[in-house]
Structure formats: structure tokens, C-alpha cells
């Protein structure tokens, strides 16, 4: 079986597509040339991709943390006080006074 002219990529005037026009292969989609599109570039050795990174990291981090402060600070404070209470209670229960107080109770 011989491939058709369309399969070879040339199109050969085969009516394909919405308006019966072959669009072309990859990178050659037919149609008019684009005009009025301007692109600018800079050579790789003139770029500085890390310019201002440290400065922006400090101030952006401060801005983001301060805007979320009321979401995480109360739980952090509550967790600290609960943990502090638990540590003190554990020290008391394992002290001489704590053992004497709960000597008759079996866990």
C-alpha cells in the first residue's frame, strides 16, 4: 500500500480541516505569515537570575507570615501551654510528693 500525498506531509491540496484547507505538518501550519509581533531577548551571559533574591526573600517572607499570624499563632501558644502543663504534671507525678499522693491508686 502506498502512502497518500497527505501522509507524506506535503498535503497535495487535500481538503482537510474546517475550511477544506490542509494546515501543514508540525511547524508549518500554513496560513498567512504573522506580522507585527515583536520579541525581545537578552543574551544568557548578561542575565542575573538571582538578582534581589535575598532581599525579596526576607521581605516577602515577613509579609506572608504577618498576614497569616492570627491563623497559626493561637494554636502555637495553646500548644506551648498545654505541653508546659503536661511536663510539669509529669515531673510532679514522678516526684516524691506525687508518688506519696497517689501511692494507693493503681493505674
Image (cartoon, rainbow, N blue to C red):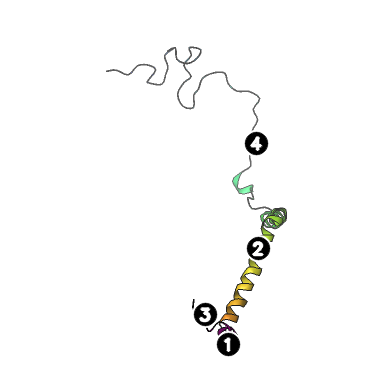
Q: Earlier in the sequence, mark 4 or mark 3?
A: 4
Quadrant in which the N terminus appears: top left
Is residue 6 depicted above or below 105 in this figure? above
Q: Nearer the viewer, mark 4 or mark 2?
A: 2
In the rendered image, residue 77 lying in the magenta stretch gets the answer no
Question: Residue at 60% of width from left, 81% of height from top?
Answer: 92
Label 4 Cα crowd, 10 Å radius (few <14 / some 14-19 / many 20+): few
Give the SS element for disc 1. Answer: helix
CA distance for labels 3 and 1 = 15 Å
Q: What x and y, as percent, mark residue 67?
A: 72, 53
Q: Earlier in the sequence, mark 2 or mark 3?
A: 2
Callout count: 4
Q: Earlier in the sequence, mark 4 or mark 2?
A: 4
Q: Nearer the viewer, mark 2 or mark 1?
A: 1
**Residue of label 1:** 96
Label 3 Cα crowd, 10 Å radius (few <14 / some 14-19 / many 20+): few
Label 2 Cα crowd, 10 Å radius (few <14 / some 14-19 / many 20+): few
Q: Which mark is residue 82?
A: none
Q: Which residues are magenta?
A: 96-107
CA distance for labels 1 and 4 = 79 Å
Give the SS element for disc 3. Answer: loop
Amino acid at each position: 500500500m502506498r502512502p497518500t500525498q497527505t501522509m507524506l506531509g506535503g498535503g497535495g491540496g487535500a481538503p482537510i480541516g474546517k475550511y477544506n484547507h490542509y494546515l501543514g505538518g508540525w511547524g508549518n501550519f500554513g496560513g498567512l505569515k504573522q506580522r507585527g509581533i515583536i520579541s525581545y531577548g537578552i543574551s544568557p551571559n548578561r542575565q542575573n537570575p538571582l538578582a534581589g533574591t535575598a532581599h525579596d526573600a526576607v521581605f516577602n517572607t515577613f509579609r506572608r507570615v504577618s498576614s497569616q499570624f492570627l491563623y497559626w499563632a493561637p494554636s502555637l501558644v495553646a500548644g506551648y501551654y498545654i505541653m508546659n502543663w503536661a511536663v510539669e504534671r509529669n515531673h510532679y507525678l514522678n516526684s516524691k510528693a506525687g508518688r506519696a499522693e497517689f501511692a494507693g491508686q493503681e493505674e
